[in-house]
Image (cartoon, helix red, strand yellow):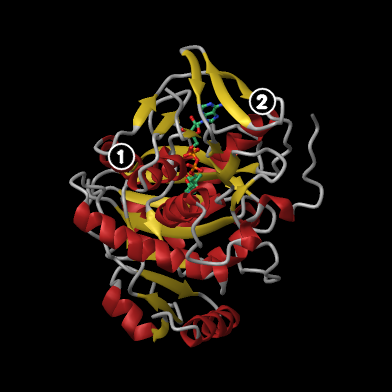
Amino acid sequence: MIYDVTVIGAGAIGTSVAYHLCQKGFSVALIDHGDIANGSSSHCDAVALISDKAPGLDTQMGYASIQHYGELAKTFSYDFEYDRKGCLYVCETEEEYAAASAYAKRQASDGYDMHMVDAQTLQEMEPFLAKDLLGGIWTPGDIAVCPYKVCFAFVEEGKKQGLQVYPYTHISRIRLSADHAVEAVETDRGDILTKRVINCAGVWAPDVGRLVGLEIPIQPRKGMNLISEPTERIVWHKVMEFGYMMSKFESINFRRNVSPLVEEYNVAFNIEYTKADNILLGGYRGFRGFDVRSELEAMQAIAERGIRFYPCLKEINCIRSYAGVRPYVKDHLPIVSAVDTIPGFYIAAGHEGDGICLSPITGKLMAQLVAGEPTDFDIQKLSFSRFANAQQTA
Ligand SMILES: Cc1cc2nc3c(=O)[nH]c(=O)nc-3n(C[C@H](O)[C@H](O)[C@H](O)COP(=O)(O)OP(=O)(O)OC[C@H]3O[C@@H](n4cnc5c(N)ncnc54)[C@H](O)[C@@H]3O)c2cc1C
């Protein structure tokens, strides 16, 4: 058999791409060298937000993806814990409050449901928050999902439409024809003949790219979370400090009033509860290669920042921590694109801290691209050719 499409990588992006291609009637193989959700999609938080997106295309994609999650939650028989919990950004200083107000105003003028709430409303919404906060941004439409269950849901729903899954399958070569078009994926389980390959390998997409001589500019950007013991409810929404935006977007020139440890580890407070009654406390951004060991000082910084915003966390035990890597692209936009120089080769990777959020819309856009249909948005800005120095080395 010759597959229409072979998707490499069974994370939130690859599983969604595979599912949406099956929906369009393509025959699809999904390969991973581990299990489903082997990579970043099982080492992350669980939210899909517009409130952490840059205005414009970034927010537009986030919003469309969140709406799409709502539809999938109604139609899928696999429960991926869709929860419309909303997101609250809290401000510590006048300067932050002014920056948050400008951001919320801009997003609201683009038609998104996002507005400022005052200090008293914060306390009513989240009574365990520190009492000295000035207010924040409330985005009621933001949601949470269980990220690895999202991957399994796409796979299970895709299988109903013929999706073939190859877990624990190691790729040795992507074979191209004499005219440089995709022909087969050679693996330790035999050759998979295919007309197209979509590289959805997240932070490992550069390795897969090298198999066909491409340099893909994605770097691993580490994150870490602390997990509490199961506890009584102390938090009702996704809650983050507005300073998170400074931690995510280096271009925002703004210094927070934080300790040297918090500054050093680029820690920005965010918290959420899980269905198992634990608390997830993040988060941190650092470039440490592929090292996903927990770092003691980073854990201390996350705890310090958590207690600053939820003083009662001091009384709750941390039972473990975990780290993962985000597939970081310098311009903070993913690559969702064909590769002009290799007919049949596509990339859907580089979603940094937004891959869970952008999973449904990325799958939909990629399926439209492969089918030769108009895409829901102009995705020129997501093209691989935008990287001036992305060059073929073979
Ligand atoms: C601490 C932390 C918190 C985060 N919180 C959020 C959040 O709340 N919301 C959000 O939207 N995003 C969040 N993210 C980002 C999110 O985790 C990623 O953007 C997303 O998981 C990327 O999905 P992916 O499918 O591209 O990559 P992955 O999930 O890494 O999937 C890639 C897959 O490719 C496979 N693979 C790699 N190389 C090969 C190969 N050669 N052959 C075969 N298979 C291969 C891997 O095994 C893996 O399964 C967070 C990230 C971190 C680290």
* Closer to the camera in the image, 131 or 302: 302
Looking at the figure, which quarter contains the C terminus? top right
For label 1, count other residues whose C-alpha is less than 10 Å away and answer few (under 14), some (14-19) or many (20+): many
Number of the front mark, 2 or 1: 2
Q: Which residue is located at x 33 percent, y 33 percent? A: 163
Residue 310 in view here: no
Provide the residue designation for mark 1.
Answer: 158
Q: Which residue is located at x 61 percent, y 31 percent? A: 182
In which quadrant of the rendered view does residue 154 lie? Answer: top left
Provide the residue designation for mark 2.
Answer: 177
For label 2, count other residues whose C-alpha is less than 10 Å away and answer few (under 14), some (14-19) or many (20+): few
* Closer to the camera in the image, 193 or 364: 193
Decide if residue 282 is on the left or right side of residue 122: right
Q: Position of residue 209 (x, y in %)?
A: 66, 34
Residue 327 in view here: yes
> How many numbered badges does the structure rendering display?
2
Q: Counting residues from the N terminus, which is met first, the one under dot 2 or under dot 1? A: 1
Q: Secondary structure at mark 1?
A: helix
Q: Which residue is located at x 77 percent, y 45 percent? A: 390
Q: Secondary structure at mark 2?
A: loop
Label 2 to label 1: alpha-carbon separation: 29 Å
Looking at the figure, which quarter contains the N terminus? top left
Please name the amino acid that badge 1 sits on. Gly
